[in-house]
Amino acid sequence: MSWILMVIFGLTAVLAAIGTVQTLRNKEVLGFLFNFGTFVIFGGFTVATLITHGYPPGLH
């Protein structure tokens, strides 16, 4: 079931990365901080889940 969590965290990280780029273009500082923070945190969770459970996830 960890692969579902990995997919959700990964999609959130991708959307936050897109939002980060958009806020940089519009020069919105607060939006950039929140988007970048979300990208770092959820991207880190995705990488940590990949390291811990591997890909493809093991069935145990």
Image: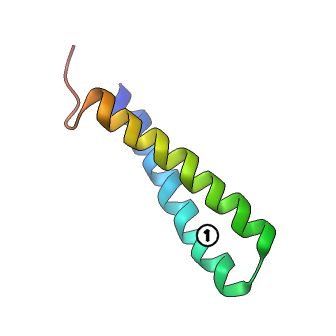
Residue shown at 19%/24% (left/top)?
A: 58
What is the three-letter code of the residue carrying label 1? Gly
In terms of image quadrants, where is residue 46?
top left
Residue shown at 54%/70% (left/top)?
A: 18
> Dot 1 lies on which element?
helix
Pinpoint residue 60: horizontal percent, then vertical percent. 21, 13
Determine whether 51 is above or below 36 in the image. Answer: above
Q: Kindly identify which residue carries mark 1.
A: 19
Tell me: 9 left or right of 57. Answer: right
Pinpoint residue 27: horizontal percent, then vertical percent. 74, 83
Residue shown at 48%/49% (left/top)?
A: 43
Q: Residue furthest top?
A: 60
Determine whether 30 is above or below 12 in the image. Answer: below
Q: How is the image coloured?
A: rainbow
Q: Is 12 or 37 nearer to us in this picture?
A: 37
Pinpoint residue 5: horizontal percent, then vertical percent. 44, 34
In terms of image quadrants, where is residue 47?
top left
Tell me: 23 left or right of 7. Answer: right
